[in-house]
Amino acid sequence: MILLAGRSSILCVLRDTLRVCVKKGVRYLHPTLCVGGCAVAKKPPLSAEVGERGAEITACAWCALYIILALCYFCTVSLQKVLALSYFGNSVRTMLFAAALLVAVVVVCRVVQAVLIGRMQKLAKKTKTQVDDMIVEFLSSLRTAFFAAVALAIASRVLILPSVVQRIIDAVALIVITVQAITLAERILELCITKFVMKTGDGEAAPKFLRFLIRFGLWSVGLLLVLSNLGINVTSLITGMGIGGIAIALAVQNILADLFSSFSLYVDRPFEVGDFIIVGQDMGTVKYVGLKTTRIQALQGEELVIPNSELTNSRVQNFRKMQRRRVVFSFGVTYDTSVKKLGAIPDMVHEIIGKAEHADIDRVHFQKFGESSLVFEVVFYVTSGDYNIFMDTQQEINLALTERFEKEGITFAFPTRTVHMVQ
């Protein structure tokens, strides 16, 4: 049993024990160590029991024990003094509590986040709704910096801090929370836009412009919010930005017109990629709709680049969305055609068009007496919007009509003029 007689006695014991341990010729420890009033229980000579090596090991063990006891004593005595110290009006005990609170808030938030993400991901796999996907996106976007900012704002309320330091902490927390909120809003809107584009199969030009507008708006609002909470007068800043914005808008008004026209085309959807359109004197298949221009593959093979602002201000004919095509054509027969044959012509045309695969007859009429022919008007529908099918059907009807008239002895008229000479 070790009897401690004070701090000086422990130091003496440690000093003499270390001196014994480092000696080269150590064979045993003195059975009784009594230094400065400190008594140690008697021990038999170790060299006689375990030999020289055992004595060295035992000496080291006793030395370690004395060191541990000394450290415990010093810690017990000094801890109360350390905790009682005060800095900037806060005791060490309060500072340690604030630090522990900060760490605890961060750890608890991260654990709760991990648990909720795991459960919501399992739920999202079982449902088709997008709400749970957005919740997972929201939870995944929360970073450690966000939790640390919140924890710092909470822990700082425990301490008595100078007003400047408190304002700095509040500003840092506000900036981090604002950035996190904007990032979260961006990710949710990105998810919505991506889902919409995948569903509609549209190009990426207009969604890119939409993303740019959303991000610009979110970060502008976030910046003004932070500056306002920091005590900065944002009214003059907004006024200056308004004047600068007007100047920039005047300088790049044509570019902005094309950009907003691109957004208008995306929302209104007068045509899509792959549609055959006619714009003024130009016609072709839409290949790409960009932020500033739209590219059309003309029938001759060249690529037409048309500004989006011109497309929104022009009449656009879109043939792809046409379900069927109305066709009106006329033909004339000679004046020497008999009345019987003239009466049979409408039935012949009905029969010919009725046999065509992609044609529906509407009407056939003896329309008028022309200068050099008896004119018939025919109206029918091609039941497809495809231009090639339209031309194939028209060709089929024309060939069949020519063959039938040739068989019936009916002659197509061509422009002629009879001149009577008077002698």
Image: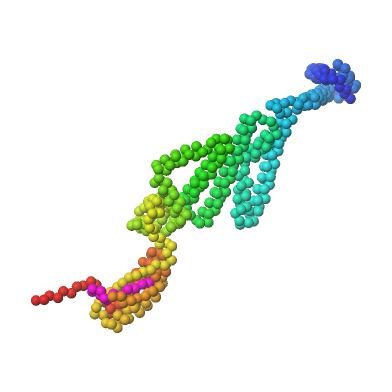
Residue 130 in the figure: left or right of residue 241: right
Q: Which residue is located at x 46 percent, y 51 percent?
A: 263
Where's the C terminus, which quadrant?
Answer: bottom left
Image quadrant in which you'd find residue 300: bottom left
Instruction: Residue 186: give x, y in percent of width and height.
Output: 55, 46
Q: Is residue 378 left or right of residue 165?
A: left
| Start-end of magenta stretch | 369-380
Magenta-span inclusion, residue 379: yes
* Of residues 219 and 397, the one drawn nearer to the viewer in this rendering: 219
Picture quarter containing residue 221? top right
414 is within the stretch colored magenta: no
Predominant SS along the magenta part: strand
Which residue is depicted at the point 78% across and 26% down? 80
What is the quadrant of residue 272 in the picture? bottom left
Instruction: Give the farthest residue toward the left.
Output: 423
- State the image coordinates of residue 126 (x, y, percent, origin top left): 64, 56
Q: Residue at x 54, y 53 (%)?
A: 195
Viewer-proximal residue among 369 and 357: 369
Q: Nearer the viewer, residue 336 or 233?
A: 233
* Position of the N terminus by quadrant: top right
Can see residue 381?
yes
Q: Is residue 422 left or right of residue 113?
A: left
Q: How many marks?
A: 0
Its colouring scheme is rainbow
Query: Does residue 388 sit above or below 230 in this rendering?
Result: below
- Of 253 and 66, the residue lying toward us: 253
Judge from the rendering whether residue 2 lies leftward or rightward of residue 71; answer left or right. right
Where does residue 254 sit, x and y in percent of width and height? 39, 46
Residue 103 drawn at (x, y percent): 69, 36
User: In the image, what residue occupies the spot 55% across and 37% down?
Assistant: 227
State whether residue 13 appears in this view.
no
